[in-house]
Image: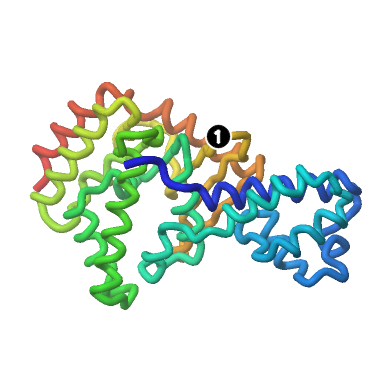
Amino acid sequence: MPAQPRPTARRIALGQELRRLRLRFSSKLTIEDAVEGLPFSEAMLQRVETGLSSLRKAGHLRLLLERYGVDDEETVEELLKIQREASSEEWAAEYKDAMTPPLMSKFVGIESAAQTIRAYHPLLPWGSLQTEAYARALVAMQQPVLESTTESGDKAVRLRMRRREFITREEEPAQLLAIIGEPALRHVVGSVDVMREQCAEIVELSGRENINIQILPSHGKRYRFAGDFSILDLGGGLPPQVQVDTAWGALAISGKPRDVGIFERRFERLSTHALPPEETPTFVKKLAREIK
């Protein structure tokens, strides 16, 4: 499967460039000042600069660039091209009604465009590492709590299987560095057979050149962190994005250097305290035999 189009990445790139142009024009030009008299709101420009939205009309972008003093037609046309690509619909739109957290569609869009993914999951295998049977059992477990339909659950499983392709496709697969807590493979989801199949999948995937899996054992004095998070590196000069699962079952996403830096240092500490990748197959095979 070839690499996917990158509308989310293009939105982030366009937003970053528009923010740079606004501050270059005047370091004191606020977002409120920038939209004064223009046919879109301060909230809209804020969403554009953070990559959550794109300006839908070319005329609106032209007006904004004119305000920023950008009159070089070649530059304007290049930004309009980026805007057209950024406005295209994500492939994941067909799964939208199966995405519970509000920012899930943005996260999936960024994930599909990522060159490198660093992920930490202490209690569940990282989504893209899950087998279909495990994902289906996990969704079934959550259905009564979320009061979701069977159809929505089926779509959620299909989406998870589609996301696996980001790391297993033949052309330009993402580089995955995953740290999984030992409890993620000891907690029985579905059945013992489902868990043993999941363990076998972890072993198989850990043998791929683009996938590096470490296990953080439960025993011993080790650095630990309670919540899931992932760091998505897009390449091409785009800022990395960090995603964190919140206690409310939602997602928080940030590209702020300080936020990303904290989680990069956190991942480095976790990686240092986890078992080395070459020990993953032996450890997981032994664990699978112990599951009851």
Q: In the depicted view, which residue is nearer to us: 71 or 121? A: 71
Type of colouring: rainbow
Q: Position of residue 222 (x, y in %)?
A: 40, 32
Residue depicted at x 57% and y 40%: 240
Identify residue for label 1. Answer: 235
Left or right: residue 246 versus residue 62 is left
* Crowd tier of the residue under label 1, counting other residues whose Cα lies within 10 Å: few below 14, some 14–19, many 20 or above: few
Q: In the depicted view, which residue is nearer to us: 160 or 286? A: 160
Amino acid type, label 1? Gly
Task: Determine the secondary structure under disc 1.
Answer: loop
Left or right: residue 17 versus residue 64 is left
Q: Position of residue 210 (x, y in %)?
A: 35, 29
Q: Position of residue 59 (x, y in %)?
A: 75, 64
Instruction: State which quarter of the image contains the N terminus.
Output: top left
Q: Position of residue 27 (x, y in %)?
A: 89, 47
Residue depicted at x 55% and y 53%: 253
* Res 224 → quadrant: top left
Left or right: residue 240 versus residue 25 is left
* Res 32 → quadrant: bottom right
Residue depicted at x 20% and y 29%: 283
Figure disc tally: 1
Residue depicted at x 47% and y 35%: 115
Left or right: residue 207 versus residue 40 is left
